[in-house]
């Protein structure tokens, strides 16, 4: 069933039918298929496109959460942490640019950001 959903989203994307929702839907389907690389490409492309189109626009936090989930599943924990924390970077003022800072911060605790595989072996 997910294969058909993916095909429909790809078709809708070609026709440019509400591209934002279509790209998000396609990324969700790929997550459900455990294709985190494909989902990451799709959601990252969407976020970058929206940020470039209007840097002042507050982008749906769900997009950042989905990208963080993909990063986490791909064991890119620093990037996941940045996106999980992104909503806290939204300014109070609507005139400020809401782009998150680029960080190279490491996880604050190994249990919080380690992979499930690493957590299982450490117990």
Image: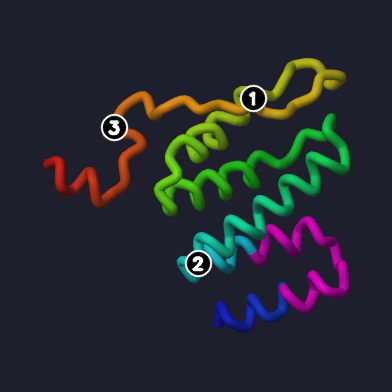
Q: Which quadrant of the view contains residue 53?
A: top right
Is 21 magenta? The answer is yes
Residues at marks 1 and 3, CA–CA distance in whole angstroms: 22 Å
Quadrant where the image shows the N terminus = bottom right
For residue 54, side relative to residue 73 (left or right):
right
For residue 90, side relative to residue 55 (left or right):
left
Q: How many marks?
A: 3
Q: Label 1 belongs to which residue?
A: 101
Residues at marks 1 and 2, CA–CA distance in whole angstroms: 27 Å
Residues at marks 3 and 2, CA–CA distance in whole angstroms: 25 Å
Q: Earlier in the sequence, mark 1 or mark 2?
A: 2
Q: Earlier in the sequence, mark 1 or mark 3?
A: 1
Question: What residue span does the magenta drawing correspond to?
Answer: 10-26
- Up/down of 98 relative to 10, above or below: above
Is 44 magenta? The answer is no
Extreme-front residue of the structure: 104
Query: Which residue is found at the position 54% from the left and 29% from the top?
Result: 85
Q: Label 2 belongs to which residue?
A: 35
Q: Earlier in the sequence, mark 3 or mark 2?
A: 2
For residue 36, side relative to residue 9 (left or right):
left
Q: Label 3 belongs to which residue?
A: 110
Label 3 environment density (alpha carbons within 10 Å; few <14, some 14–19, many ≥20):
few
């Amino acid at each position: 069933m997910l294969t058909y959903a993916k095909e429909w989203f790809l078709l809708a994307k070609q026709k440019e039918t509400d591209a934002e929702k279509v790209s998000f839907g396609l990324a969700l389907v790929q997550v459900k298929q455990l294709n985190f690389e494909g989902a990451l490409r799709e959601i990252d492309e969407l976020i970058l496109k929206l940020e470039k189109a209007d840097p002042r626009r507050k982008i749906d936090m769900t997009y950042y959460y989905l990208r963080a989930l993909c990063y986490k599943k791909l064991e890119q924990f620093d990037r996941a942490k940045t996106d999980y924390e992104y909503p806290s970077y939204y300014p109070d003022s609507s005139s400020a640019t809401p782009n998150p800072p680029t960080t190279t911060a490491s996880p604050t605790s190994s249990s919080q950001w380690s992979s499930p595989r690493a957590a299982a072996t450490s117990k």
